[in-house]
Amino acid sequence: MIRGSRSRALSTLLGAPWALALLAGCGGNAQPTAATGSGGAPSTAGNGGATTGGLGGSAATTTGAGGASTTGSDAASASASGASSSSTGAGGGPDLPLPYPTRTAYRIKGLQPDFWANKDEVAGNNAGGVSMNLVWASWEGTVKAPPCAATEEEYSGHCYTVDANVDASIAEYTAKGVVVTSVTYGVPAWSRIDNCSPVSPGFEIFCAPKDAADYGRFAGMLARRYDGKHGHGRIADFVIHNEVNANDWFDIGCGQGTPCDTNAWITAYAASYSAAYDAIAKEQSTAKVLVSLDHHFGAVFDTPAAQNPLLSGSTLLTGFAAKIGNRAWRVAYHPYPPNLLAPQFSPDDLPKVTYGNLGVLAGWLRKTFPNTPSAWEIQLTESGVNSLAPGSTPAGQVTGLCNSFHNVLGTPGIESYIYHRMKDHPVETASGLGLGLHDENGMPKPAWTTWALANRNDLNPPQLSCGFEDLPYTRLTRSYKASRGHWASSRVPPPGFTLEQSWKLLRDPAAQTVMLYECAVGQHNFIAKDVNCEGQQPMGPVGYAYTAAQPGSVDLHRCRIGPGVDHFVGPAGCEGQIDEGSLGYVVP
């Protein structure tokens, strides 16, 4: 997003000017800062370049909100995602909502485009989504009643200023079949709580609103204007405020020496979320409304009395879910590496949840909210990998990006991965942080090639890498390290493990299948059918196994060495070790 998930770490590392500099050029109502220079998609065998004819730029047709695609092609009708500007669109009439633009996993990747001039360089490389910052303070800096000017949008007795550049970007990306996510934040001065204590000058827009209904009205206006049926394109996903578990970014009037009340914090956010959810649902019943969290997930991060107060993601979600009734909430997560200046991450990153252990979030949500299926749907709405010295290198960024794709695709339930960002920002690079796929001058880095070409199932022949080659499956790997034992996962193992075998599991549910879960115990892990991991640490879903033999399938068993000092997966008989039973049938 604007300042990024680097909220806590980089507020200290880079300071407030870094955060405020990012307000420009990240999709909000600010003037674009991105260069228009080179950066077209790299070419492989002459056919990997960005397409200008819309190849790979249409969203898959859907059966409704959150429904599965009705076609196997990712070049399905763009009208299903609201690309049509007609008043009827795919919804069947002016009063009927458009179905949710469900994407297949081949188009799970997206981008924070930084107002990149050539949108075909994003959409034409089979991107499924983009994120845009919609800053309330820019749309409604002062309260104005109708009549509204031609450059304003009237909604519920208020006039909102429309930024022509943002407006055109949403329309153009929608027309290209790219799903637009709105990060909806930035409280105007007239609506801020009186006792706000911003961490630094310029952070006032992160004060909580006095009246959540005012924020909800803004969200409702966006949902109506960008419903895909009014000629302005469509926003299908709405992120409510940003990184709300950090008081720096959702300030309820505490911090900087004043302890925060955890319940008051969660109550204030739940009020904003509920008001926005209800207003959005009134205009777009199929839109998804998400809670934004940074990567501080474990309860050890609960420090409401700190100078920069923080709630863990797990604490905030638990309290939040108890306050919002039956609303179908979802998570917008920022899984940056544990050290934002380094490209490394691993399954050992707890209590942070990063690219390396994404499954922890997915497993925790399924375990904690078994009766709230919407909570199992995860969107990664902001995260990236550094490329700059001394913490990283361009090659390190490539490896990190490719491994992040592997782990995203290896985690059922993740449906969108927005990479932050298209182009480096000079304030970030001055502190050694270069997340962009292009440098400050708009020149492509090696990671641009990886991002652009990893999922090209729209080419003939397809060009797939970084886990996309395994779709529609996840790949369950069995690895070994002498000092730790075996590791079985659909995600990248910890450093130093050597691959022994692998099998394929379905990423999406199907008839006669059962979800399998990765569970940590000691220094190794095991696979279970139990979402609770038999009382051990959940590491997340790995995919679906068949419950009955299929043509070409093999019976996969869980195996134990000695009294639980090690586990592995393998064929029946467990290679002479203790057989703990069948996990199901998988594809070799």
Image (tube, helix red, strand yellow):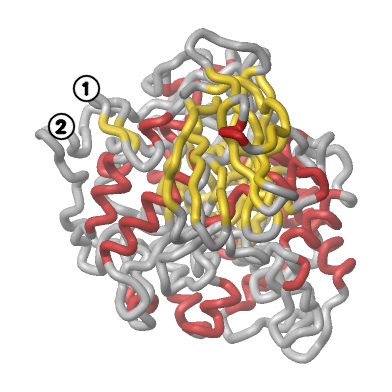
Is residue 379 shown left or right of residue 111?
right
Place of residue 4 in the rendered image (x, y in percent of width and height, measured from the top left): 51, 66
Tell which circle, 1 or 2, labels the residue nearer the N-terminal end: 2
Image disc number at residue 47: 2
Closest to the observer, 122 or 10:
10
Place of residue 540 in the rendered image (x, y in percent of width and height, measured from the top left): 65, 44
Residue pictured at 41% horizontal, 49% vertical: 111
Question: Disc 2 on helix, strand or loop?
Answer: loop
Is residue 535 shown left or right of residue 387?
right
Residue 105 lies, with reference to residue 509, above or below; the image says: below
Residue 65 lies, with reference to residue 334, above or below; the image says: above
Q: Amino acid at mark 1?
A: Asn
Residue pictured at 58% horizontal, 45% vertical: 379
Residue 455 lies, with reference to residue 3, above or below; the image says: above
The part of the image, by quadrant, that contains residue 393 is: bottom left
According to the image, label 1 marks what residue? 460
The part of the image, by quadrant, that contains residue 188 is: bottom right
Closest to the observer, 552 or 174:
552
For the residues labelled 1 and 2, the Cα–Cα distance comes to: 8 Å
Question: Disc 1 on helix, strand or loop?
Answer: loop
Is residue 190 shown left or right of residue 346?
right
Q: Classify mark 1: residues with Cα within 10 Å, few (<14), some (14-19) or many (20+).
A: few
The part of the image, by quadrant, that contains residue 446 is: bottom left
Asked whether the residues under the numbered discs 1 and 2 touch, taking CB atoms below 8 Å apart as contact, a structural biologist would say: yes
Place of residue 517 in the rendered image (x, y in percent of width and height, measured from the top left): 67, 39
Q: Amino acid at mark 2?
A: Asn
Residue pictured at 32% horizontal, 68% vertical: 387
- In this view, the residue farthest toward the front is 576
Q: Is residue 358 visible?
A: yes
Residue pictured at 81% horizontal, 42% vertical: 369
Place of residue 53 in the rendered image (x, y in percent of width and height, measured from the top left): 22, 27
